Image: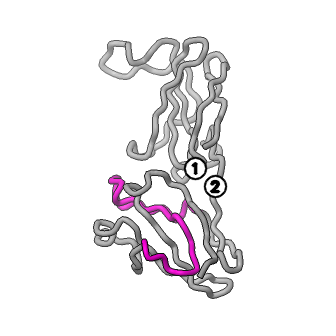
């Protein structure tokens, strides 16, 4: 978790907000009065806004309501950094973008965001790479790929890859978000 001091777009007062290490705020709306108490057919327009409304599935967006010391209402829109491709669209965060490395030779294997599999908006159909190991883990079902049929049957899956640098067999261990709702990478293990 990382604490950010979010600036109110109306008065520049700051409020502390905790975000997960992988989370980014990409859009902020601010209102001079509570937008939930206004009676209208449509949502009121914000008095000030920062960032852009982006097309991100509502299932993957978190809205946080805050109020600054000057009684302005802020709505923060945040999600996993993988959904916000342009760094210019990231207002706050992420604290950490995970890079993957071979546990045997430390060869760079890519970014963690490339190893999040979303087959559906259901948490049981979203798999996140949790660990890369040099030995199979009995808690994970070995498979060639994460498919709809495998995802619907097993909560934890493992896929074997070869390190392009040293040729070592690497076990990419995934769990779905029903098991662990975070999208955090946990570690690499060189234990065989």
Above/below status of 87 relative to 53: below
How many numbered badges does the structure rendering display? 2
Q: Are marks 2 and 1 in contact (CB under 8 Å)?
A: yes
Q: Is residue 50 magenta?
A: no
Identified at 68% across, 72% down, the residue is: 108
Is 131 in front, or is 44? 131
Residue 50: image quadrant is top right
Mark 2 crowd level (few <14, some 14–19, many ≥20, 10 Å Cα): some
* Vertical side of 148 occupied by 53: above or below: above
When asked about the image quadrant of residue 131, the answer is bottom right
Per the image, the residue denoted by label 1 is 22
Quarter of the image where the C terminus is located:
bottom right
Reading the image, the residue beneath label 2 is 97
Q: Is residue 47 left or right of residue 106?
A: left
Badge 1 local density, few (<14 within 10 Å), some, or many (20+)? Answer: many
Q: Is-magenta flag for residue 123?
A: yes
Residue placed farthest to the bottom in the image?
167
Q: Which residues are magenta?
A: 112-139
């Amino acid at each position: 978790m990382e604490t950010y001091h979010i600036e109110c777009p109306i008065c520049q007062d700051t409020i502390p907000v905790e975000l997960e290490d992988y989370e980014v705020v990409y859009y902020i709306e601010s209102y001079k009065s509570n937008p939930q108490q206004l009676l209208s057919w449509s949502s009121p327009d914000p008095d000030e806004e920062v960032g852009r409304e982006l097309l991100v599935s509502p299932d993957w967006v978190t809205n946080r309501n805050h109020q600054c010391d000057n009684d302005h209402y802020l709505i923060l829109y945040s999600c996993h950094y993988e959904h916000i491709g342009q760094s210019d669209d990231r207002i706050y965060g992420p604290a950490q973008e995970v890079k993957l490395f071979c546990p045997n030779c430390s060869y760079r294997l890519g970014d963690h965001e490339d190893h999040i599999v979303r087959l559906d908006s259901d948490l049981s159909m979203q798999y996140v790479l949790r660990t890369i190991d040099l030995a199979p883990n009995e808690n994970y079902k070995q498979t060639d790929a994460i498919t709809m049929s495998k995802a619907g049957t097993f909560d934890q899956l493992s896929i074997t890859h070869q390190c392009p640098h040293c040729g070592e067999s690497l076990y990419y261990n995934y769990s779905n978000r029903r098991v662990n709702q975070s999208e955090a990478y946990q570690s690499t293990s060189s234990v065989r």
